[in-house]
Amino acid sequence: MLRREFLKFSAMLGSAGLMPTLLGGCTAPPLPGTGKVTTSTTVCNICFWQCAATLYTENGKPWKITGNPGDPHCNGRLCTRGTGGIASYSDPDRLRQPLIRVEQDGKQFFKPVSWDQAFDTIATRMQTIGDRHGKDRIALFSHGGGGKHFQRLLQAFGSHAYAHPSFAQCRGPRETAFGLTYGEGVGSPDRTDMANSRCIVLIGSHIGENLHNSQVQTLTQALEKGATLITVDPRFSVPASKSKHWLPIKPGTDIALLLAWINVIINEDLYDKEYVARYCSGFEQLTAHVQPYNPEWAYLETGLETEQIRTTARTMAQAAPATLIHPGRHVTWYGDDTQRCRAIAILNALLGSWGRPGGFYKQEKVDLPTFPAPKPPGPGEDWMTQVQADYPLVSTGISNVMIDKSVGPDAFFKGWFVYATNLTTTIPGVQQQLEQAAQSLDLVVVIDTMPAEITGYADVVLPECTYLERYDDLRNKAERRPTLALRRPAFTPKYDSKPAWWMAKGLAEKLELGKYFPWQDYAQVLDWQLKQVGTSLKEMEKVGVKTFSRKTPVYFDAGKPVTFNTPSGKIELYSQVLAEVGQDPLPGYIPPQRPPKGYFHLNYGRAAAHTFGRTINNPLLFELMPENCVWVHPAAAAKTGVANGEYVHLKNPQGIQSSPVRVRVTQRIRPDSIFLVHGFGHTDPRLRLAHGAGADDSGLMHNVKIDPVMGGTGMRASFVTLVKSEA
Ligand code: MGD
Ligand code: SF4
């Protein structure tokens, strides 16, 4: 008998009464807007861009959600996904009450319990882990603001290990690379000054399909003003279709292109000499380093015409410093990602775009005091030196490494809290480790709104209410204009779901750590904070967003000295820090593996209607996009004998096969690659819309490349072939 069986549908429904009516919560109101309409301010949580919004109810029922016009972050507009957010509240498949894993007659299943029973179970197991192994042995995996409350709870208990997949599975390489080069990262929202750019270069960043709202808006503004767009992508993406230059690069060869661009810009004297002399160090080493990497060499690697490489380099230089080589967002590709991001950072420095209009601006946030409460004790020992010592430059948790360190009887971690992240599909190549960890961990708590697959590994499942039913922390993001935005409950939580702050406080009280949560409810915390900056909860409940004045300039002050937070105080083109830890101080190029005969590069990305796998079951968004399809070039389709509209399976060299997925034959993809929208292929039948819809890309990733600088998982090096479906 397995210690922790993966629990699916039948076992989950320990109580038949849990089975909701399919789409029962989604009946449309008779005529929209004719009933009693009320409004409530909120902040969208369908992705983490956090656009401020107004929720409309009609006769107490959800009606629609629109952008808050007072929000300079979204300019009164939501993206497609944001407008569908309302259905996350009414989704009938939501988790409804706390569940604990029980075993009876040799069978495991989830039993609905009270919150008190759930907290008792968790607190008892935490105490046991603490007594047997030490209080620092519980890890938190979190993707979303509510995770902060569990982080506080665990810190108060004695565990400081914390990871969010947005680092090691997404933008960690870029933050590490820009940190090494400029002494600070790009941040989120990205500090790109696109609205003022005269030339924008997108490298594997498909803004327009990737719908980070304000980025789409500022890109559009730049294009309206005549900016030149250059898109580097093996696929004819939406931005490629708006571009003056589309560079259909051979997958994984971007560093070769970047080195050739740097070569042209230096050798043709096109770089910003004054900026480089004033702010940068290591220019001589860089110049010597790029000499072999001319466009003729890059042509052989990338398949891009030498003239196209030269022309685009010159175009960038002509528009500089209002040229933005976009730093990208999801950048964990081939394991050489920090180095590729370093090459992007260096190219921007040569063009003088950091700190200048049309390049990268300086972000600022509101100086918001924290609610007075005792500070949790600091870590006794630094867990990072024990868990992720191979990555000395990283100061945040690396989720995949933490999972590795949870496997087996001698593993460092003995317990997990998993907040709002479906680790089974978020972290590629860890299926085996997840299953092994499930056998050795003493506690797995999953906090979610939906029965995501990861709940199958839980001992305790805690149902969180949706963002429309709760207060969360104020949005206080560093960006161009400091603003605060309020998310507040428009509805009382459905079923027996609760907000994260309530759960963390309740658990803390069970553990006799209540003093770290000295508030009655979160409204009290928010009101106190808002009063410190001259407003109040009452005012914010009316306006939703408040804008504050900046204290520092948006760009570098012309002529004034700038000190960068790097060891030399300069922009480090050559990184001594990397040299000291045995990594390349200047980006080098390693050719990627090519697909074996009959196989294709497995390429993936986003679509306008969905956020990862988390929205596939959202009834409104599902209606917009109920399945993904696999893009196949006509030549590849002819070779493999598959036709447009036909269903196929994708199979990797290890024999792992996807669920059936429909073929879309299109010229918009290179013949050596196929493309799939990420997030589909859910396997849990409790997600009744998403279950079995489309194919999952993550499960096919057999060749995950670990970045030696920051430990992230490179996800683009896998291959698949097409197998005709019997279905
Ligand atoms: P991906 O979605 O991975 O990344 O958005 P992006 O950072 O834009 O898109 C990757 C693009 O890279 C694709 O067009 C693909 O064809 C191209 N590509 C693949 N291989 C290569 C290569 O070797 N070289 C080059 N040059 N290009 C390549 C992710 C971003 O999107 C993130 S991180 C988040 S958290 C948000 N999520 C999200 C969402 O889920 N849905 C929607 N609609 N928008 C989103 N916006 C954000
Ligand atoms: Fe919501 Fe779209 Fe804004 Fe993300 S970008 S917060 S999904 S409106």
Image (spheres, helix red, strand yellow):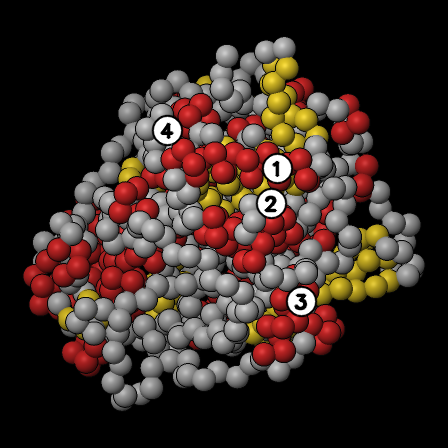
Q: Which residue is depicted at the point 52% across and 74% down?
A: 368
x and y percentages locating residue 663 in the rendered image = 52, 29
Number of the front mark, 2 or 4: 2
Identified by mark 2, the residue type is: Lys
x and y percentages locating residue 428 in the rendered image = 41, 35
Q: Nearer the viewer, residue 666 or 218?
A: 218
Residue 204 seen in the figure: no
Number of the front mark, 3 or 2: 2
User: In the rendered view, would you say 106 is above or below 436?
Assistant: above
x and y percentages locating residue 377 in the rendered image = 42, 57
Q: Secondary structure at mark 4?
A: loop
- Circle 3 is placed at which residue position? 524
Identified by mark 4, the residue type is: Val
- Circle 4 is placed at which residue position? 407
Q: Name which of mark 1 and mark 2 comes first in the sequence.
A: 1
Q: Nearer the viewer, residue 429 or 651?
A: 429
